[in-house]
Image (cartoon, coloured by chain):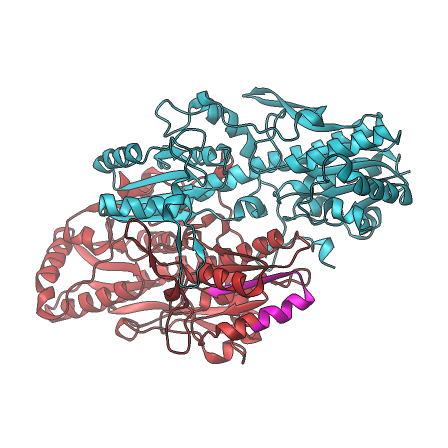
Chain colours: A cyan, B red
Amino acid sequence: MNCMIAQSGGPTVAINSSLAGALTAAEKSKAFGKVYGAINGIIGVLNDNIMDLSERSASISDFTSRLSLTPGMYLGSCRYKIPAGADGEADYKRIFEIFKKYDIGAFFYIGGNDSMDTVDKLSRYADSISSEVRVIGIPKTIDNDLACTDHTPGFGSAAKYVACTVREIAYDAYIYADPSVTIAEIMGRDAGWLTASSALARTAGSPAPDLIYLPEVAFSLDDCIKRTRELLKKKNSVIIAVSEGIRDKDGKYISSSSERLDRFGHAMLSGAGKTLENIMRDELKIKVRSVEINVLQRCAMHMASLTDLKEAGLLGETAVSLALSGKTGLMTVIKRESSAPYKVQYAETPVSSVANAVRNVPRDFINESGDDVTEKMIEYLKPLIQGEPAVRYADGLPDYLPEEHLF
Amino acid sequence: MNCMIAQSGGPTVAINSSLAGALTAAEKSKAFGKVYGAINGIIGVLNDNIMDLSERSASISDFTSRLSLTPGMYLGSCRYKIPAGADGEADYKRIFEIFKKYDIGAFFYIGGNDSMDTVDKLSRYADSISSEVRVIGIPKTIDNDLACTDHTPGFGSAAKYVACTVREIAYDAYIYADPSVTIAEIMGRDAGWLTASSALARTAGSPAPDLIYLPEVAFSLDDCIKRTRELLKKKNSVIIAVSEGIRDKDGKYISSSSERLDRFGHAMLSGAGKTLENIMRDELKIKVRSVEINVLQRCAMHMASLTDLKEAGLLGETAVSLALSGKTGLMTVIKRESSAPYKVQYAETPVSSVANAVRNVPRDFINESGDDVTEKMIEYLKPLIQGEPAVRYADGLPDYLPEEHLF
């Protein structure tokens, strides 16, 4: 009997650690003859685009430890949802044909919300045809918005990158004696976890960010400008962290006010940061700039959280244990026992309770006026960014494994 | 007799290393009673806003080594040019009054082009009033466009950040099986050095960036689209690095085509990357995205080049030696003896030959079709990004000195 692993959804810095963890545990268990990887998620299963991970692991020295320190998604990704109900029948049939062809006893799917929907459907289908194939989900998302787990692999590293970056942007902004406002726009359209993590940038010597706006609280432009004016009376450099998803009390994205067509007829929708920059400059008549913290949030392996990578690996290992004990239709989760000292347990939850649910920032993690986070949020976030992995450098740059699916 | 140091212009990751180098050399020499720092560049001299660096160095343990690993500008910055001719007289008088007040025998100014103009003017003025004050410039700029030096401190670290970031963005882009184009926009309005350094991201397993466009060669939109179409026949993910300053054969910035007013009447000028993204999406009808590599290019101490920081420090030391040997009106420079093995000498040049000159990328560092760099460029760039400094971490994040001028 063999097993198969696939990855899906957007990348995180930790998703290859989960792959490495599952691979290592599957090999150690000796329960599987071979560990296969499906290229580009469930699409790779449907298209019979399968690679032999056991062979790769045997032929590259330190394969799993190097894999854990490689960004992107080693097996590639897809954004495919199996159609609901009878429309999905053809897919199910094909997938279980492939499982049979490769003598698959367990299928592990590393991904976010949509991938857990696939895990849920596949495990139900297996049940309906009395298949013995175990289907287990392993969570990942930088957005940290999956239900039933204390946090998600990938989030800690993204949070660390955001905090580091906001700290360095603040140092960049401090240098002039003239008043200025700097706006950092951070990912997270619906959940404010990543934007909140900018608060970790603060030190006794560097108080930035001064204001933090999450999508969970209605954004008031007037309040934001008023608070900024007050701050500018006391300091030259005001740093504001905003989620890309901030919206007003009517639920309208702030960025929607900037929509215009350019000369080619393209819709030009500025981001929240850029829109706020333009408005603020107009109101305050001082230097205002915005920085869009970019996709590095999900691929900056050079600033990964060691805690995050370790947890991602252990959730991969846990998934293999669950399958070996005959369980199916589950997602592995992290349960926090305490924040200081930081203690967690690795457990599981029925994947049906995760799929299609979203976990937002609780109101008491945000201050009353909605422009900062509370001490509860800091306590929650702090352990997740601890530790720096020993990224390998060659010729002055991080040295990563080539992505398998490219070749 | 004492000496004084100041910093000016935009920040680089290495500018505090030059400050640390000059401070260390001045203290070691025992020639100066005290080392002062002027807050916010020459403005700090004009306003008598001066701090005692010797005292700070004595009271904070490991001060200079921590300073070398702190981004931003410890003494703050300014963008002030002393008026030319007789209009500058009042400034000169005031500056030399302050020099007298603090018994200054040497003034060190760390900065770019404009700062070297100030060094030139002050040394000439000193000469005209038979002042003994020595005035020496120490170069810095991430743009690498200063004349008379092989390269500038700050550039190597920015180049390393750009190359690391482009490599990680490529891994982020590789994951999908669908065709896509990713455009990375890199700083450098007139000189393409930083954009060129994206070429260092390439490895045997990751060929990105596929195309590189510098401002030194006229940009042809048609050629760029044609080349991209060709590449898409062979691979799914095409990565393009463009300088923010690319312009067409008539010298028009590509971004100028996107100018539009939003509903508040703000001019919305997209960057080169965003403009190219919109055009490409329209032409190719596939997924196209652009990433503006942001200010982290000049403040990401967490990805600094050790070679760069060391050289910045040594140029600071060299400046002190020059002043001690009675010289003035000079800027310290790096002369390269060989690239492999990498060997440089630290020397000096009359600052008048640097001020207001710009050093562009030579044509033979760019390939014939103007969409890539040549092996000469790679040889030139490679040594500059080598080595990783031991950045101190606390609580999961880089631990930097507070910026002096804020307090």
Q: Position of residue B237 (x, y in %)?
A: 63, 60
The residue at 57%/33% (across/down) is A144
Residue B388 sits inside the magenta stretch: no
Q: Position of residue A346 (x, y in %)?
A: 69, 25
The residue at 66%/51% (across/down) is B175
Q: Position of residue B127 (x, y in %)?
A: 15, 70
Q: Is residue A279 left or right of residue A52?
A: left
Q: A357 or A336: which is nearer to us?
A: A357
Q: A160 or A137: which is nearer to us?
A: A137
Q: Position of residue A38 (x, y in %)?
A: 78, 47
Whether residue B398 is visible to the viewer of this picture, yes or no, is no
The residue at 41%/52% (across/down) is B295
Image quarter (top left, top right, bottom left or bottom right) of the N terminus of chain B: bottom left
Q: Residue furthest front?
A: A86
Q: Is residue A186 left or right of residue A1?
A: left
Please tell me in which quadrant of the rendered image residue B26 appears: bottom left
Q: Is residue B212 left or right of residue A323?
A: left
Whether residue A102 is visible to the viewer of this picture, yes or no, is yes
Bounds of the magenta span?
A: B226-242
